[in-house]
Amino acid sequence: MNQQELIVSAELTSEVILKNKKLTITKLTKKKSSNKEGIETENIAEKSNEANPKPILPKELLKIEKIGNEMELLFLDDFGAIIGLDNKVRSQLGLWAYADELKRDFYTNQLQHKYNEIENLIILSGAGTSVGIGKHKKGLTMAGLWDALSNGSENKYLQLLIKKTDNYQGKDLEELLSLAGMRHSVKSDTELLDAMNHVKSFIVDECTLELEEAAPHTEFLNKIGLRPQKFPRVKVFTLNYDTLFEQAAAQERFTVIDGFTFSNPRVFNGKYFDYDIIETRHNRQDKKDSTIAKLFYLFKMHGSLTWRKNGGEIDQTTDAIPTDQRVMIFPQSNKYEHSYEQPYFEMMARFQQALRTENTLLITIGFSFYDKHISSVILESIKQNPSLNLMSVTYGEVVGKNAEYQKELHRIAEFQSRLTLIAESFIDFTIQFPENIAHRRFDVLESLNEFLRNPNIKE
């Protein structure tokens, strides 16, 4: 019996933790079944008879698929060593620890060598960069928001929305708000509108997070900001309302160009995304030598907690903002339509432009590829721009999902090594993120060039 037959012969659940044309790593775990009494038991393949025995599989296996090589199954022996079907020992680590080691070796090698001299670095930050992070309260998933809402004092507004939408049966806050919004647009209902506004205010409160000391945002900004001076600035696009990246930037003394004027009050004007900052003490004609360090561009594609409609303008404020004056795309199915309104249209146009640029690496972190208006742009850009590379970092349950856009990503990753799907948290990815060696190399070259231009300079 070969390895493929061995897998098929047992009922196994699989979790892909790395997907790339060159290497795919999958965790395999035996499913649990219930006996006649309804008690969960391990579904172990047992010998059916002496003439035709079935293999007794371990509870956990690791499937390794490398380009050009036969698939390999690994598991723990009775002494805790990792072995294959050939009984050769691969490692003394635990099975999942070994899987993580292989996974991290692969993607850090990509970042350190394959991608270290890619000129354009684009970051797309999804909900996963805020979930579980916060000093006084933690960022929540959409499911977590539903639970917090249903268990808190605002539950009465949730129940009213459910009642007004023909006793909605699900637990999807985005879907519920979509149904309520459509119901209100067809027939005006002040009670329904009031309930929707209370739920939106609840979302605002839960997304108002304070950066904690252990948050990875500061370290991540420092690592991605360490790039050769000749390279374009890093562009960070985020779908989150919170200000964790802004707080991290302030803490680390980064300059952030976010599309708002530098005057007071700060007013949105998309042309500011075309600006950069240089040090005037250098030669103004040589921008490469005079751009300041620690600067990045920030695009908040779904709006922000601090953005406000103020007359015909959009400004930033720390004051309390009424719900109808907030500049935020709240969870609703019409997010796609909102993306064609300002300032969201400006952000989307910049995102599309960035992905069409040659020699670009897009790293998505904590993004599930459920948002149609974002996912469609990424997939279209991958197909149209052959020099666009994608590294998608998210939770394991998302990497293995078979939803529309995730399925297409898996299909492309089967035959194009420029796509890598990784099951990893934002915190662990930040810890593993390597220093850009091109930064050190270009620093040495710049110093050498300066010496050759002026050999009388002393160290």
Image: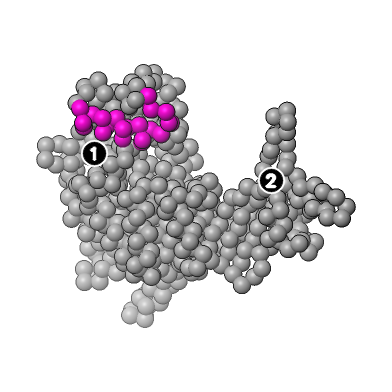
Q: Which residue is mark 2?
A: 30
Residue extending farthest to the left is 312
Q: Amino acid at mark 1?
A: Val
Colour scheme of the picture: one colour
The answer to whether residue 458 is seen in the rendering is no
Q: Quadrant of residue 459?
A: bottom left
301 or 331: nearer the eye?
Answer: 331
251 or 143: nearer the eye?
Answer: 143
Q: Which residue is mark 1?
A: 327
Q: Secondary structure at mark 1?
A: strand
Q: Position of residue 421 (x, y in %)?
A: 50, 57
Circle 2 crowding by C-alpha within 10 Å: few under 14, some 14–19, many from 20? some
Residue 251 inside the magenta-drawn segment: no
Q: Amino acid at mark 2?
A: Lys
The answer to whether residue 449 is seen in the rendering is yes
* Range shown magenta: 167-187
